[in-house]
Image: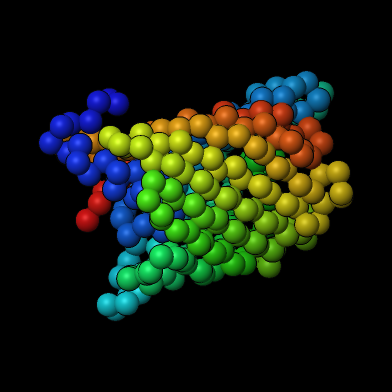
Amino acid sequence: MLAASSDYAQDTPELSQLAQNPIAKAISLPFQNNLNFGVGPHNDEQDTLNIQPVLPFNVGNDWNVIARAIIPLEYEPPLGQARNSMVGVGDTSLALYLSPSHPGDIIWGVGPAFAFATASHEELGQGKFDAGLSAVVLTIQGHWLIGALLTDVVSVAGPSDRNTVHQMTLQPFINYNFSRGWYLASSPIITANWRGPDNRRWIVPLGGGGGRAFRFGKQAMNFQLQVFKNVVSAHDAADWTLRAQFQLLFPK
């Protein structure tokens, strides 16, 4: 499946940039699997498969709205002597980005972000409805695509017996694109729990990997693999993460 058809080899650099741009004007369906090592008191493995559909909409001639959802399917190991492992759906998040249809050197988008209490088990979600803002900015310069995605949400509704949430995620991304769709990538996800104690507030990973955008027949696809080490980590959080992503692309 990593062999691109020669009929479409000429557009693989554009496919790479399309796959790497979180607010590209194209429908896409990424499946991002994060396998975490060293979780909890017994250094167990934890796994999250994020299904991340992206749908762009035209708003007149000058603007687009890009809807990005994240639906997590989670495996949680036993984190205490009285708990069992569990599998289920986590909380669903949604961001809506207003972005210019004809950007210049700087591509950007900004809009509201939400998190919905859709977890199938109490332990797999926060139990709150969160709202806030999300913003994306990036630039494409030759072989380079560089940018960042920032989201900050806070609880606005939900059961009073669940902890109030105020969380930020920052995802810088750096990509260097080669010919025939190959590229190097680094896109760590930095999180901050603003309501947590100092020793549980930040998770800061470092790492990277690579991937390839290609076509299988007429279907555009992207695959990437990255490895991250948490250089700053909350108590009982993962030490390492192996991220594998497979993405279906539907360019216009």
Residue at image x 54%, y 51%? 92
Left or right position of 135 against 79 = left
Residue 162, percent across and down?
A: 76, 54
Left or right position of 72 against 169 = left
Is 3 situated above or below 184?
A: above
Res 230 visible? yes
Circle count: 0
Is 80 situated above or below 108?
A: above
Q: Residue furthest left?
A: 7
Residue 144, percent across and down?
A: 43, 48
Residue at image x 68%, y 49%? 191
Residue 211, percent across and down?
A: 41, 33
Res 51 visible? no
Could you say which is closer to the camera, residue 148 or residue 163? 148
Residue at image x 22%, y 56%? 252
Colour setting: rainbow
Is 203 situated above or below 251?
A: above
Left or right position of 228 against 192 = left
Corner quadrant of residue 115:
bottom right
Is 10 situated above or below 3?
A: below
Could you say which is closer to the camera, residue 139 or residue 74? 139
Q: Residue furthest right?
A: 198
Could you say which is closer to the camera, residue 13 or residue 89? 13
Residue 189, percent across and down?
A: 61, 45
Q: Where does the N terminus fall, quadrant-wise?
A: top left
Residue at image x 51%, y 69%? 111
Could you say which is closer to the camera, residue 200 or residue 213? 213
